Image (cartoon, helix red, strand yellow):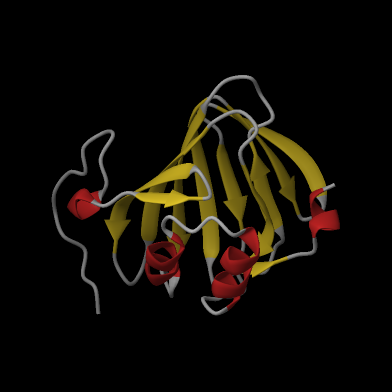
Amino acid sequence: MTALEKGITANGTGYGGKTWNILGQVYFPKAVTDSTFAFETNSDPGQFVPVHIHPTQDEFILVQEGTLNLKLDGVWVKAHAGDLVRMPRGIPHGYFNKSDKPCRALFWVSPMQKLEALFNQLHNLTDPAEVVRISALHEVDFLPPEAND
């Protein structure tokens, strides 16, 4: 069981000094506990995470800088700096930086389930098919590519 530790995870750093590179996007874990998992993403223009489902977790995104286009339960929406996106478990969602500027966002998922273990295994992988395969073993199910249209 992972308990919440008091303290501060400084800007531009990850909890415990950890950083993940997942298919070119940089992720910083900010808080890691059984009840919640928080991480920051830095998405360059054109980067995205395809539509997927967390069957056992609720997820939130607080956009800190820039704009994210999201496919949320089959509908395209935009979230701007300061907006909070709510994604209940079981709802298909994906996020895309379709702008010409970087986007920074804080994500948190509750409960953590297998997400930290997933991110550890995805770090520095370059094969999208392998990312999809490993994700399915960690309760993250990617939809077929046409779901991103």
Q: Nearer the viewer, residue 110 or 71?
A: 71
Q: Residue at x 56, y 70 (%)?
A: 135
How far from the left and from the top, in percent, is residue 85?
A: 59, 44
Q: Tell me if I can see residue 89 in this picture.
A: no
Q: Nearer the viewer, residue 68 or 28?
A: 28
Specify the farthest residue to the top: 100
How far from the left and from the top, in percent, is residue 71?
A: 74, 47
How far from the left and from the top, in percent, is residue 120?
A: 37, 64
Q: Residue at x 26, y 33 (%)?
A: 11
Is residue 9 toward the left or the right of residue 60 in the image?
left
Is residue 93 toward the left or the right of residue 104 in the image?
right
Total marks shown come to 0
Above/below status of 132 relative to 45: below
The image quadrant that residue 123 belongs to is bottom left
Q: Residue at x 79, y 41 (%)?
A: 76
Is residue 69 toward the left or the right of residue 3 in the image?
right
Above/below status of 54 relative to 29: below
Q: Residue at x 67, y 69 (%)?
A: 90
Q: What is the quadrant of the N terminus in the image? A: bottom left
Q: Nearer the viewer, residue 138 or 68?
A: 138
Q: Tell me if I can see residue 75 in this picture.
A: yes
Is residue 102 toward the left or the right of residue 106 in the image?
right
The image quadrant that residue 133 belongs to is bottom right
Q: Nearer the viewer, residue 42 or 58?
A: 42
Above/below status of 32 relative to 12: below
How far from the left and from the top, in percent, is residue 38?
A: 38, 53
